Structures are given as structure tokens and as C-alpha cells.
Amino acid sequence: MPLLAQYVEAAAKITPSLTSKLVTPHSFRHTTAVHLVAAGVDVTVIRSWLGHVSLDTTNHYAQGNLETKRLALERLESPS
């Protein structure tokens, strides 16, 4: 059994909902990238970290989640 599958199986004992999820190495890459974007890390840094050649590929992760959008809107000044 692959190492990741062993960890998922062990984690599923604590969080049973994991048994219905597909957990892959890409899941970790994607989740990490989304969290880096939400933390305000520059997309070019994320691109380098992920090893992407093109920013177009990394921009997929830059599609903000609702929380990120809400925080950005709160930073705007009210219209006069």
C-alpha cells in the first residue's frame, strides 16, 4: 500500500469522512497553493514553489475563495 494511502487510512480513523474523499499528492499541492494565495503570498512566489513555468498555470489558484474576496472588499474605502 502506498505511503499516502496508509496515512489517509490512519487519519480516517479520526476523521471518517476521509474514506469518501480522493486524497492525492496533488490535493496537498492544490490546498497549499490556495492557502498561500489566501495568506497574501505573491503569485510569482507560489509559481516558483510549485515549479510552474507559466503564471497562467498558477493563476488557477489565484481565483479567490469567498473568504478572500470578502476580506478584499473590507479593505476598500466606502464610496463618497
Image: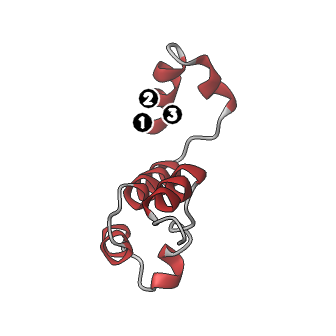
Any part of residue 2 in sight = no
* Left or right: 46 in relation to 67: left
- Which amino acid, mark 2? Tyr
Are circles 1 and 2 on residues that touch, CB within 8 Å?
Answer: yes
Foreground residue, 38 or 7? 38
Q: Secondary structure at mark 3?
A: helix
Residue type indicated by callout 1: Leu
> Can the viewer see residue 44?
yes
- Seen in the image, is 9 located left or right of residue 38? right
Q: Position of residue 63 (x, y in %)?
A: 57, 66
Residue in view at x 30 percent, y 73 percent? 45
Q: Which residue is mark 1?
A: 3
Q: As rendered, which of 49 and 70 lies closer to the eye?
A: 70
Q: Which residue is mark 2?
A: 7
Report crowding for label 2: few under 14, some 14 to 19, many 20 or more residues within 10 A (C-alpha).
Answer: few
Check contact, mark 1 vs mark 3: CB within 8 A. Answer: yes
The residue wearing badge 3 is: 5
- As displayed, is residue 51 above or below residue 61? below
- Give how far apart the Cα atoms at labels 2 and 3 are: 5 Å
Residue farthest to the right, as pictured: 20
As drawn, 18 above or below 26: above
Say few, some or many: other residues with alpha carbon within 10 Å of mark 1 (under 14 / 14 to 19 / 20 or more).
few
Q: Residue at x 35, y 62 (%)?
A: 40
In 3D space, how far apart are the residues under numbered discs 1 and 2 (Cα atoms)? 6 Å
Q: Are marks 2 and 3 in contact (CB under 8 Å)?
A: yes
